[in-house]
Amino acid sequence: MEEQVRKKCKFIDNGDGTVSDAVHGLMWLKRDTWLEKGRLITWHESQEFARELNQRKFAGYSNWRIPTASEAKLLFDPEVTNTDMEGCEIHLDYVFTEGCGFTTWTSESRGAKAAMGYDLRSDFEFWLAKENDGFPSAVRLVRNIVLERDPDAPPRIVDNKDGTLTDNDTGLMWKANDSFIELDKWVSWSEGKTWIKTLNDSQFAGHTDWRMPTRKEVQSIYDPSHSVTDNYGETVYLPEGFTAGSGLTCWTKTLHKTDLSLAIRFQFYNGDYKWHKIGLRSHGVRAVRTNRPKKGSPEGEN
């Protein structure tokens, strides 16, 4: 199945230093950091490179980022060959500039010290220390191709001036600050539930139906077109209007069907989600509620 997806992938040279993958809605840099800098770089240098390109709006865009591991895999095609920095065969479409690095950093992290790299010679994933100068990597940045919003449409996120935000696209109301901003610590899944209970007990913003989001709900506020900084100064992707300084991740109410010790946590730095033990104090949580209209008021709550 994965091989079939790859075969459908068509890369288009946009003539401005970028390459589009219209099948998956992605745009890649035509040249990686090896070609740009003449050296391999650490994971944190990759983040800085993305910030630099976003500041100068390379090719007109400001949402360049490190690819996820699954996105990096979309570059690999066993039926095509290119040439890497060492003159070796690399399975990367020839639309990309030859002489590039044969690996790329990904946004997949293992704690604060390690990140995943991906090898385009052999379709291989591996872990590297983020600051290991002895085994650095290149990176090929990517961005999501985002459709322009109708300028006459109302703003997506509305600040209700009471510590809440309304998402006009989904009808959901979110607490503007997540648990990390409020508590200044990571929480387990149960502690996240307890924090939300305190919001309901205190009738935060006049409501008593705050809850943990589902995976799909929290995924709906992942916005690769808009970046803010998290509590450690790293880049996360949330719609305009959400507060900077929040956690990288968010617990969801989605529990594993056969193992109730696992719940999904969502990652705002790359849009991925994974199963995690609910007892781990390693994530934040965002409180959400369904914004129901008041009786006799079809316009909904203010």
Image (tube, rainbow, N blue to C red):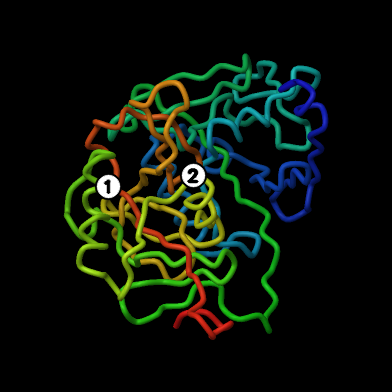
Pointer 1: residues within 10 angstroms few (<14), some, or many (20+)?
Answer: some
User: Quadrant of the image for the C terminus?
Assistant: bottom left
- Name the residue at 46% across, 55% down: 237
Q: Of all residues shown, which one is farthest toward the front?
A: 295
User: From what the image shows, is residue 46 above or below residue 288?
Assistant: above
Q: Residue 24: which disc? A: none
The three-letter amino acid code for the residue at tag 1 is: Lys
Residue 85 position within the rendered picture, expressed as x and y whole percent measured from the top left: 60, 25
Residue 104 position within the rendered picture, expressed as x and y whole percent measured from the top left: 53, 31
Residue to which mark 1 is pinned = 193
The tag earlier along the polypeptide, 1 or 2, is: 1
The three-letter amino acid code for the residue at tag 2 is: Arg
- Name the residue at 49% across, 44% down: 215
Secondary structure beneath disc 2? Answer: helix
Q: Which of 40 and 284 is in front in this view?
A: 284
User: From what the image shows, is residue 235 above or below residue 101?
Assistant: below
Task: Using the numbered discs, state the Cα–Cα distance from disc 1 to disc 2 in whole angstroms.
Answer: 15 Å
Q: Which of 263 and 176 is in front in this view?
A: 263
**Would residue 131 be found to the left or right of residue 6 on screen?**
left
> Which of label 1 and label 2 is nearer to you?
1
Residue 160 position within the rendered picture, expressed as x and y whole percent measured from the top left: 39, 80
Q: In which quarter of the image is residue 263?
A: top left
Residue to which mark 2 is pinned = 215
Secondary structure beneath disc 1? Answer: helix
Disc 1 + disc 2, Cβ < 8 Å: no
Q: Quadrant of residue 197?
A: bottom left
Q: Quadrant of residue 6?
A: top right
Residue 260 position within the rendered picture, expressed as x and y whole percent measured from the top left: 37, 26
- Name the residue at 40% across, 66% down: 242
User: Quadrant of the image for the N terminus?
Assistant: top right
User: From what the image shows, is residue 94 above or below residue 26?
Assistant: above
